[in-house]
Image (spheres, helix red, strand yellow):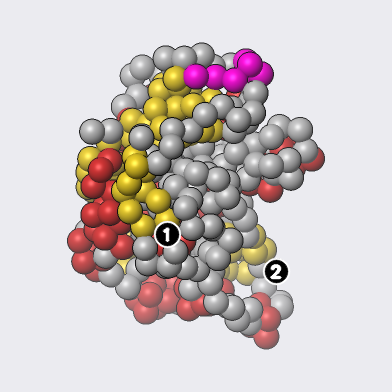
Amino acid sequence: MRAFVYHGPGRAAWEPVPDPVIEEPSDVLVQVHTTTVCGSDLHILEGELPEVRAGTVLGHEAVGEVVEAGREVHGLRAGERVVVSCVSACGRCRPCHDNAFGQCRGGGGWILGHRIDGTQAEYVRVPFADLSTHRVPGTLNGDAAVLLAETLPTGYEVGVRNGQVSPGDTVVVVGAGPIGLGAVLTARVLSPARIIATDLSSARLDDARRIGADAAVLPGRLISDLADCPGADVAIEAVGAPDSFTLCTRVVRSGGHIANIGMHEKPAMLHLEALWRKNVTISTGQVDTYSVPALMEMVVSGRLRPTPLITHHFGLHRVAEAYEVFARGTETGALKVVLNRD
């Protein structure tokens, strides 16, 4: 088969690799029909995650067809279509019992495209398949389904749920990239009074309005607009930069929540001199994907319509081009780029 293989910082190629095989009885092999590129894939390609070994197939989101199942896989059989979760769950350790699959201590967590070969390939081996895949209803197309592998659960779990968004809240989302806009979409289902997105890119602000934000403004305008009110009930950080985290601390109200989604590479200053008396709750975390079944029901019912997040389609063999377009998203207009089986 062919796959997109990481060869060290700045180097990757679509090339022949050995077909994956069942290695553990809880594995399945999936023929990839749809996959995508994530911001963390860019971090790997830029050499920012040194634990990723050269020779690793990248990617951790997919929809595909089960072609073979190990003898201990009980909930799947060949021919079924599944979402491959970005997080794998052994189902036996304490974090997994608490639905904290991202913290799995039994060999799971974020492993696809990170510690083992991933989904930007014609076929992928999926460990712990009963808990790490989700059967796709026939009415759900691949574009919508692949957004359930990571984008929607991350915005919902790490942003909306950790931030405790409630009906009537004012929610500020800092960063209008795919994950931030996933938070905008999924926050809507909890009936906040208003959702305000902020970004430095005017194109991303236009995307936020199109996706469903009540307002989309530059950071300076955001601070000005909130100056005469208590502030945001929930501020969701979806960039992973020191300035965006600081902005969240400035706009959140006393007693409010800051939910950090962004993947930070540099230290961010925690201004306790300004926060110590505000009774602010700060949450961090990695997605666990426990919410996929509920989000899938919302998508199937039409309550959640995520496909406007998808801006570009490529054949799977054009994955290198997809990376380039995605990496220059503020120039190309790319949010989620989807790769389909050729």
Query: x, y (%) of residue 63?
Result: 40, 31
Can residue 26 be seen?
yes
Q: Compare marks 2 and 1 and give the one earlier in the sequence.
A: 1
Task: Name the mark on residue 7.
Answer: 1
Residue located at (31% from left, 48% from top)? 14
What amino acid type is highlighted by mark number 1?
His
Can residue 192 be seen?
no
From the image, tell me which residue sits under label 2: 279
Numbered disc 2: secondary structure = loop
Quarter of the picture containing the C terminus is: top left
Residue located at (40% from left, 41% from top)? 17
Q: Viewed as shown, does residue 130 lie left or right of 242?
A: right
Task: Name the mark on residue 42.
Answer: none
The stretch of residues the image draws in magenta is 68-74
Residue 120 higher or lower than 207, as above or below: above
State the separation of the CA atoms marked 2 and 1.
47 Å
Q: Which is the main secondary structure of the residues drawn in magenta? A: loop
Query: x, y (%) of residue 106?
Result: 73, 40
Which of 112 and 207 lies nearest the eye of the viewer? 112
- Look at the image and say whether residue 91 sits in the magenta stretch: no
